[in-house]
Amino acid sequence: MRVIARTAALGVLGLMLGAAGPADSPVGVPEPEGLYTGPPRGYTPATLKGATVVDLKGLEKLLPENPVLIDVVLADHRPQGLPADRPWLPTHRSLPGAVWMPGAGAAPLAPEQEEAFLTRVAALTGGDKAKPVVTFCRPECWGSWNAGKRLVAAGYTRVHWFPLGVEGWQDSHDTAVAKPDPAWSAAISGRAAQR
């Protein structure tokens, strides 16, 4: 009787997983041809063509090379209904030494914003397209994937994508308070990065 019940349960589970299909599954998500323009949160591919996907150990091994760490987590917005006379001081925590460019992984970006992103990365790398660059955001966030894709398209040869993001880092390491990069903030003309 237990064997029959277990077999039936496994059959139902198999049907449910089969019905979910690849788009609803954390495995087998295909890479889009270009930048991903759908919802910013959701299952991402396991790959990024032209870049190296790194887990926590891979990132730790890369750190002695002083890679440029680019955090593209979107900025929080002031809560609706919060009285104007009340201070609102959101804090973003990131990998120590990371440059936070909120919303730089959005797609599409206005042409001047995309140019500003690439100009800022060029400044951070000293114009060396072979310098390692790591893009990250939050888990299941397309922003860091798009940022990495932009850099690969711009000719950067050592792009690393850390899909575990800030949360994957803070599971084993301390984080640091990050402020939006002033050059990026100026380039996007005060337009708030949207969630």
Image (cartoon, rainbow, N blue to C red):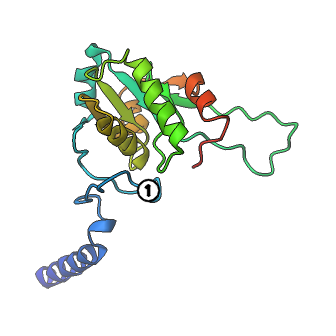
Residue 80, percent from left and from top: 76, 51
Rendering quarter of residue 131: top left
Vertical relation: 35 (above or below) 68: below
- In depth, the one of 82 and 11 nearer the eye is 82
Vertical relation: 185 (above or below) 145: above
* Residue 88 shows in this picture: yes
Q: Amino acid at mark 1?
A: Thr
Residue 171, percent from left and from top: 38, 33
**Residue at the farthest right position:** 85
Residue 110, percent from left and from top: 54, 45
Q: Tell whether 46 sits left or right of 70.
A: left
Look at 59% across and 47% down and name the residue there: 194
- In depth, the one of 93 and 77 nearer the eye is 77
Vertical relation: 96 (above or below) 87: above
Q: How many marks?
A: 1
Secondary structure at numbered mark 1: loop
Disc 1 target residue: 37
Q: Tell whether 36 sits left or right of 184.
A: left
Q: Tell whether 181 sits left or right of 27.
A: right
Look at 20% across and 76% down and name the residue there: 14
Rendering quarter of residue 13: bottom left
* Residue 163 shows in this picture: no
Vertical relation: 47 (above or below) 148: below
Q: Tell whether 109 sits left or right of 147.
A: right
Image quarter (top left, top right, bottom left or bottom right) of the N terminus: bottom left
Mark 1 burial class by Cα count in 10 Å: few <14, some 14-19, many 20+: some
Residue 64, percent from left and from top: 27, 14
